[in-house]
Amino acid sequence: MRPLIMIAAIGVLTFFAALFGPAALAGDKPKGGEEGDVSRADLVGVNFIESCTFSHRAPDDPIVFPGRSGASHDHTFVGNRTTSASSTFGSLRSGGTTCRRAADTAAYWVPTLYQGANAVLPQGATIYYRRGTLAEVQTFPNNFRMIAGDATATAPQSGRVTFWSCGAMSGVPPSSTVPTCPEARGSFLRLHVRFPSCWDGRRLDSADHKSHMAYAMGRGCPSTHPVSVPAITQIYRYPTRGGEGFSLASGSQYSAHADFVNAWRPGELRKLVDDCLNALVHCGRA
């Protein structure tokens, strides 16, 4: 009977190896969201991507000037079609969206780009939701708000936060000012704004709309902001090859910044966070 017992044992081990991978044979947990099970290499390419077209523009800012229509410099909005100075979580959830995922009624916006006196409106925005830490990612609470970048900047900001580019295949390096893009397919002006991904776990917003958040360091969150949330990058694509004479409604080319209000359908956002970011999977676009 011993040979039969050995064959049965080998069969059981083979089953677990196929189901969970080699880690199961070693007594380890299958790779998932536990920080001790995840390496920096595991985070490469882990994301889901949203694509949103231009919605509207207005001198409104529901984060900085809530309820005060016309009080802000001009903004360009993508995503939620109803974003205005008077927007609330309820109004955003009831609004339509220019994003591919109907569940994404979040509000995204940047200062309007001008060439001389003429507004240059984006064709759309690509919004990356990544996992920036070794720890599991939590979803944003309903009505969560944040701003990335400095609207008052008069000198180059950190390239970790914002920069201009001509696209990954253009051969033009990222720049703190608007570059001149080559006459090549797909080589058009882009504005990148990267948001922090560590939350204090308490506030939906803060007085400066930033201090409730912090950037991850070494793939971990600081003790002051211990909760890991999706690392958002907004990339706006403009139908121009750049060059001279560009400014932002907030000021110089250095004053790039972006805003986000979470109004996703909660269950759909939770599913994307769990099935993509916490499962260490590249889900890509909708």
Image (cartoon, helix red, strand yellow):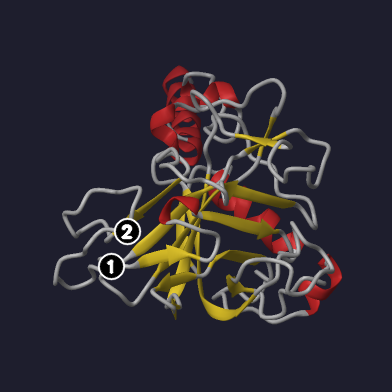
In the image, is residue 64 above or below residue 87? above
Q: In the image, which disc is placed on residue 250?
A: none
The x and y percentages for residue 41 are 38, 31
Q: How many marks?
A: 2
**Residue 276 appears left or right of 80:** left
Residue in the picture at 64% in, 22% down: 222
Q: Are marks 1 and 2 in contact (CB under 8 Å)?
A: yes
Residue in the picture at 47% in, 19% down: 26
164 or 49: nearer the eye? 164
57 or 216: nearer the eye? 57
Q: Is residue 9 visible?
A: no
Q: Earlier in the sequence, mark 1 or mark 2?
A: 2
Mark 1, other Cα within 10 Å: few <14 / some 14–19 / many ≥20 = many
Q: Secondary structure at mark 2?
A: loop
Residue in the picture at 30% in, 74% down: 240
The amino acid marked with disc number 2 is Val
**Residue 175 appears left or right of 86:** left
Q: Secondary structure at mark 1?
A: loop
The x and y percentages for residue 61 are 71, 65
Q: CA distance from mark 1 to mark 2?
A: 6 Å
Q: In the image, which disc is placed on residue 178?
A: 2
Residue in the picture at 76% in, 52% down: 144
- Residue assigned mark 1: 242
The amino acid marked with disc number 1 is Gly
256 or 55: nearer the eye? 256
Residue 158 lies in quadrant: top left
The x and y percentages for residue 70 are 73, 74
In the image, is residue 38 above or below residue 187? above
Residue 58 lies in quadrant: bottom right
Q: Is residue 237 visible?
A: yes
**Residue 154 appears left or right of 270:** left
